[in-house]
Image (cartoon, rainbow, N blue to C red):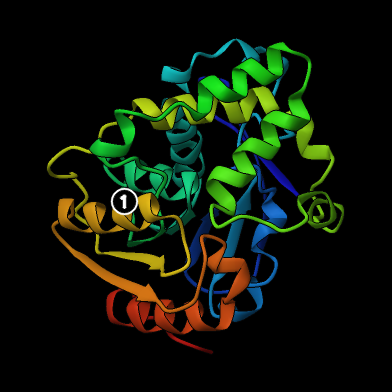
Amino acid sequence: MQTIQSETGIEVTYDCDGDGPPLILLHGGMAPKEYWTPIVPYLDGYTTIIPQRPGFGTCPESLAELTADDVLNREVKYVQTLVEDIDRDPILFGHSYGALTAIEAATKVPVTAVVAYEPAILPAEYRETANLADQMQTRIEAGKPGEAIKQYIELVLHPGGIDDLDAWLSDWPVWPDCIDLADEVLRMNRAVERYQLPPSLDVTAPVLTLTGTNGPDFLRKSARDTHVALSQSRLVEFDSVSHAGPAEAPDVLSSEIETFLRAHSPRSRD
């Protein structure tokens, strides 16, 4: 584990492993940095840099005072701090909210390429009626943060439903610790509900935009809309893969990512 601090006081904690072009992995939702464990072995030609998102276990209590409008800006500054400390322009690989962060960060800092798996962006017709944050807040204020997290899981992570949610949760590595993240997940969802995808995104680097046929409909549409808003984007949809693509099908995704990165960030092997 390494820690750096910017001149403005932003502290970034991350793991770094491997040898090759720097590849920053940005997790989303409630996932800890360990979310990337299944796919990292398939990225052995790169130096993988895995930060722990601010507010998800490593940041000061003062972050609890942030409003939803501040959340994305906080995330982007966090990535900026990390990018500025790296000797070479990195590749950003983000999942869900991490994918949105990667795209926004790429409008502000030089990167070699971006890989975005189902960025957490609500298409206009979904955003107009979105109320997950309100539903979560009602449960949190009633002293039921666990129920708020379950609501998030059922609507975002597994919209097709889970036959026995409690049994599924008992096998989920981050449960029940993620209950403590209920307020942070609430703020994140408010930020998602307020974010509006512009007609075009000022990202000059090539982007690989990914989605899966088993993911939520709104995130699949988000991936397509994001692809259209980018000047250099390749869109790939994986059959029978869910929103958890990087962890669920690391071999399939990594093969596509490798082909894309070889074309846009050629590397040499010693």
Q: Quadrant of residue 92?
A: bottom left
Relative to 226, say whether 54 is above or below: above
- For mark 1, what is the residue? 222
Q: Who is closer to the viewer here, 41 or 136?
A: 136
Q: Who is closer to the viewer here, 75 or 142?
A: 142
Q: Horizontal placement of 230 versus 77: left or right?
A: left
Q: Secondary structure at mark 1?
A: helix
Residue sticking out furthest to the bottom: 270
Relative to 239, say whether 52 is above or below: above
Residue 245 % position (x, y):
53, 67
Residue 7 in sight: no
Tell me which amino acid carries mark 1.
Ser
Q: Who is closer to the viewer here, 35 or 130?
A: 130
Determine the residue positioned at 52% across, 30% down.
188
Determine the residue positioned at 70% across, 18% down.
140
Residue 82 % position (x, y):
51, 43
